[in-house]
Amino acid sequence: MPMEDIQSLSNDEIASLVLTNKIKDHRLEKLTDPDRAVIIRRAVYSHKLATLPTSNSTTSNSPIDALPHLHSLNYSKVYGANCETVIGYVPLPVGIVGPITLNNQSVYFPMATTEGCLVASTNRGCKAITEGGGAVSVITRDGITRAPCVRMESAKDAALLKLWCEDTTNQSENFVQLKKAFESTTSFGKLEAVNVSIAGRNAYIRLRCFSGDAMGMNMVSKGSLAVIDYLKTIFPSLVLVALSGNVCTDKKAAAMNWIEGRGKSVVVEATIPRDVVVKTLKTTVKAMVSVNINKNLIGSALAGVVGGFNAHASNIVSAVFLATGQDPAQNVESSNCMTLMEETDSGDLWISCTMPSIEVGTVGGGTGLAAQAACLGIVGCRGGGENPGDNAKQLAHVVAAAVMAGGVSLLGA
């Protein structure tokens, strides 16, 4: 159809052409104009999202309706919650990616980025994964951590504190008391583990708690203070040096998170048929496996990375975090990822991403802002889940699958 004929059509008519695959949605800017293309694309994806069974919207409106595309920000939502001394805001373009088949469901997800081709490349990875039957994701651990630093009168006292906190000889009665103190401060938080590291007279008490659909830093911090108060009744000489002793470890590259995990520990995998590798990724299975070994494994080992055995996990994590109201600084540990690839006996490509420390939430923080809440709605996990933690877990699954899609596309470039 000639361009001038397309421009004469209504937005709904053009949207219908996109939905019937007569026009590719990435060509809308050239066929109409950039402003009109956004409006048409919003209509297209509102229709697509409406066909998914995963939407948790309580109204007939599309989650995209709440995603601003004109200049607007409700500053009353920001005050006292997200920023101080506000003078404005920085608009970031948001692209939509998908569908990707994940745990037998079709999922779309948003990415906020200024890096050209990132959304398109991730979409290509989603297409390849879905053509192979989709991805399967499992969460192996779920718990946010805080590690107060306390100082004792002697190294011996610090060691005794460690032995007391980690004692299991009396059916963990000590842990029961710590758990009671911690959970007195929260409705959703559940203390799951206590581990203590010592350095001379210093003790670092790493507390891990389940935090429901919240990312959980405020929750675990309040609970940690209650634990310290209780420990002072057992060890009167104990002095709190810092609520966070940097063994948590928050917003810093750390082997602790890579080995022990923090937030959601996720492993995701997929098998992509070799004909899809050739057709969609424009390469071969053997070439993909070779590049992954030499780049992501050997190259990263030479660089001495911690958790960086991947192509560009932080690219994808950052973009999804910015769109969905996560703490962007936690991209540091949330991007810990090992990507593995193998050629199967039938010549297909098997790929997995192991991500031990994805820190996400669907309530609290930036998730309450309108645009970010709308983006969570696109994923189908806005607000609290039917069961505490369900929505945050779904977001972690999506982040891991998105990283795998972005990685497989880049390695095939």
Image (cartoon, rainbow, N blue to C red):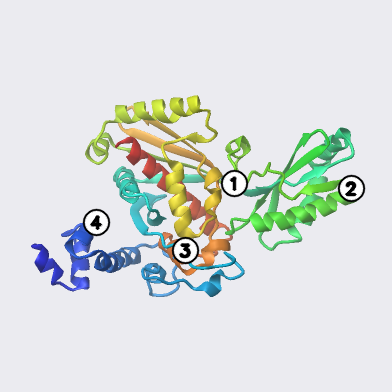
Q: Earlier in the sequence, mark 1 or mark 3?
A: 1
Residue at which label 4 appears: 26
The answer to whether residue 180 is seen in the rendering is: no
CA gap, disc 1 to disc 2?
32 Å
Q: Earlier in the sequence, mark 1 or mark 2?
A: 2
CA gap, disc 1 to disc 3?
21 Å
Residue at which label 3 appears: 372
- Please state the horizontal and vertical placement of residue 109, each as a whole percent of the image: 39, 56
Q: Which of labels 2 and 3 is toward the front?
A: 3
Q: Earlier in the sequence, mark 2 or mark 4?
A: 4
Q: Earlier in the sequence, mark 3 or mark 4?
A: 4
Closer to the camera in the image, 201 or 284: 201
Residue at which label 1 appears: 251
- Please state the horizontal and vertical placement of residue 256, each as a whole percent of the image: 63, 37
Name the amino acid, label 2: Ile
Whether residues under marks 3 and 4 lie with C-beta atoms below 8 angstroms apart, the answer is: no
The answer to whether residue 283 is seen in the rendering is: yes
Whether residues under marks 2 and 3 lie with C-beta atoms below 8 angstroms apart, the answer is: no
Name the amino acid, label 3: Gln
Name the amino acid, label 1: Lys
Q: Which of labels 1 and 3 is toward the front?
A: 1
Residue at which label 2 appears: 234
Q: Which of labels 1 and 2 is toward the front?
A: 1
Name the amino acid, label 4: His
SS of the residue at dot 1?
Answer: loop
CA gap, disc 2 to disc 3?
45 Å
User: In the picture provided, is 295 more to the left or to the right than 246?
Assistant: left
Residue at 39 percent across and 70 percent down: it is 71
Q: Quadrant of the C terminus?
A: top left
